[in-house]
Amino acid sequence: MVSVRIWAFLVAAAMTVAGSGGACAIAVGQESAPVSPDAPRAAEPLSLREAVQNLETHEPRPDVESILRRLDKLEQAAAAPFENPDQWTVKFGGHVQLDYINWTNADPAITGPAAEPGTKNYFEFRRLRLMAEGKGYGNLDFRLQMTLEPETVGDSGGAATSPDVKDAYLSMNDIPWLGRFRIGNFFVPFSLEQVTNDTFNVFMERSIPSQGVFAGDREVGVAFYNANENQDFTWTYGAFFDSISDTLKERIDDNQGYRLSGRVTWLPYYDEPSNGRYLVHLGAGVLYTDDQNNTVQFRARPQIHEGPRLIDSGILDATSYTTGNVEAAVVWGPVTVQSEAFLSRVNMSIADPATIGGAYTHVSYFLTGENRKYERFGQHGAQFGRNIPNRIFSLADGGWGAWEAKARWSYLNLNDISGGEYNDLAVGMNWYWSDRTRVMFDWIHPVTSSTTTFGSTTSDILAMRFDFNW
């Protein structure tokens, strides 16, 4: 860009010389013709450097100003996000999470084939992902996110054969009466904790009921999102295929199964002057699943990614199940309380319908004064967003980032299908270096009843994570 500006100066200098009627010349090394001593002396020739300096120190001619304005536009365009002739802007990102899990006190009853991968300590890349997202034509947006981390041991028997598809969707926004339309692979709109990005959730893993038990994960389908003018009310609904593998990315079967979901939220109180530092969120949802192979299974790990299923219903013959939930959250300055309850009715094939349920409640407190950020109509509707420290962590500037203390109780009841009960307590601390980097510490205390997979057990787990994204 500097060379372009120099050429502009040269052109402008030549134009200045031409406009002066030949009263001055630029010396380029040639000798001038002899002149009479009595003749009027011509102006001394200017060097190239002097001509450019003279141009810069005098009021620019209109044509020079035009050239400089065009150069400024070129420089601004070079600094803007990538934009092709079809009016698409694209940005690239990634997400890395490094976990270390230590079973400080594993109950000796958790043994045998059902305990795989066991209670061994481990390190893993919990998430290792690349992402591209963009916008186009004022009302379209897309997102593509692929995983590079291996599959969970015990689910696939080893590393994934190909990258998993996580987010892969296109949205059309601002449709009259309908709001936002989305098609592709994305989160089923159900449960506040589930639709909130894992980067923005308080704990390393989601609670027991929403950790793949009652809440749907990412599925292939379509959905509509909408809100009133003030975004105090939001409503979302969609239809999806039932559990198509993120790795295989296909299913060849006459019976695909399907899921129907709906979610509504309400903000009875939102403090506008503080941009949501004080708010009350309420919501409810329903998720109906017509199972693809007429079998269901409800099970959960102790709120870590790898580990034994401490509660497991086994494979049950069932045609469908319907889950309802209610959600609530209060943000009051640095304090946040969030809770959800789930109730599911399972339509058994050869037995009476069964009813199972679960719940969680957690509280968090920013010791450094920040508050959890809330998105009234975010990527997946009403959800929590990216936390921003008042001061980033920097040894050079003396900033210590943001510190967040936390505690959670979560519960799962499978007694009606002979699965038992599971309580899980967790406390910990999050240290935010910046809005995109944090260190997480969770102490987890799972407690199971006598009718669960391993009987009555009590264990302790220390979990640590380094989490950053860009």
Image (cartoon, rainbow, N blue to C red):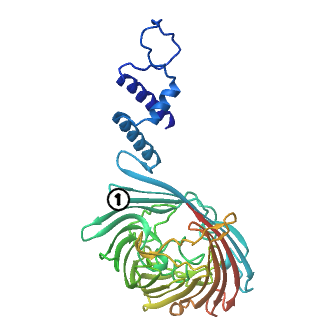
Vertical side of 237 occupied by 96: above or below: above
Q: How many marks?
A: 1
Which residue is at the far left? 176
* Residue at the spot 58% in from the left edge and 76% down from the top edge: 205
Q: Nearer the viewer, residue 103 or 177?
A: 177
> In terms of image quadrants, where is residue 10?
top left
Q: Residue 280: image x %, image y %?
A: 43, 86
Work out whether 428 lies above or below 67.
below
Circle 1 residues within 10 Å: few <14, some 14–19, many ≥20: some
Q: 437 or 464, which lies in front?
A: 437
Residue extending farthest front: 38
x, y percent for residue 364: 57, 84
Amino acid at dot 1:
Leu
Position above or below: 96 against 452: above
Query: Residue, x 37% and y 38% (percent of image)?
Result: 65
Q: Badge 1 is on which residue? A: 140
Q: Position of residue 442 (x, y in %)?
A: 65, 79
Q: Secondary structure at mark 1?
A: strand
Q: Quadrant of the C terminus?
A: bottom right
Q: Nearer the viewer, residue 127 or 234?
A: 234
